[in-house]
Amino acid sequence: MKNRFICPKCRSDLKIGDHIIFSTQTERGLRGVLLISPELGNYTIIHDDKFNFMEGEHVDFSCPLCHENLSIEDIDKDLAEVIMIDEKNEEYKIIFSEIAGKRCTMKIKDDKIIESFGEDADGFTNYWGSGPKY
Ligand SMILES: [Zn+2]
């Protein structure tokens, strides 16, 4: 997988090896680092055992380098975004849910959904129209 994942604010690379790295904070103020698979639709998350969040809890995602919050509050406070650059140097927005346990990822270009992943993605298609589902 050669796709790059970068911060939309400072454009630093967030993918190291086979993981995208985020610094996060739960509603209860617990902080931790999350490692997420760069494979869209793969919801495997790696974190320290001491950093645990509850199903359904909102988890704030921020860039580990510039510390900017990645939420897209103007659209939905429970969604966050990163930029993916593929092998052809095409840039996409990757929008994902900040609710623990909610499986929803959307790949967006020019404000249209190109692909969506996860069984909870349907609830968000009203923002960008629906695209092919995987
Ligand atoms: Zn950043």
Image: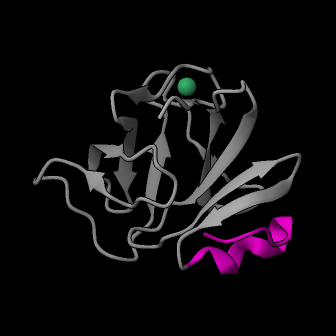
Relative side of 82 to 63, left or right: right
Relative side of 80 to 66, left or right: right
Q: Residue 82: where, in percent of width, then height?
A: 60, 40
Residue that lies at the very extreme toward the left in this rendered image: 49
Which image quadrant for residue 35? top left
Q: How is the image coloured?
A: one colour
Q: Is residue 36 above or below residue 13?
A: below
79 or 113: which is nearer to us?
113
Q: Which residues are magenta?
A: 120-134
Relative side of 17 to 112, left or right: left
Looking at the rendering, in which quadrant would you find the C terminus? bottom right
Q: Residue 56: where, in percent of width, then height?
A: 40, 77
Which residue corresponds to the image point at 79% horizontal and 59% vertical from the top-left?
Answer: 113
Q: Residue 28: where, in percent of width, then height?
A: 32, 62
Q: Residue 4: where, in percent of width, then height?
A: 55, 28
Ligand 1 shows up in the quarter that is top right
Q: Is residue 50 above or below residue 17?
A: below
Number of callouts in the render? 0
Which residue corresponds to the image point at 70% horizontal and 64% vertical from the top-left?
Answer: 76
Asked if the magenta segment contains residue 122, the reply would be yes
Asked if the magenta segment contains residue 128, the reply would be yes
Which residue corresponds to the image point at 24% horizontal and 49% vertical from the top-left?
Answer: 46
Relative side of 92 to 94, left or right: right
Which residue corresponds to the image point at 38% horizontal and 45% vertical from the top-left?
Answer: 24
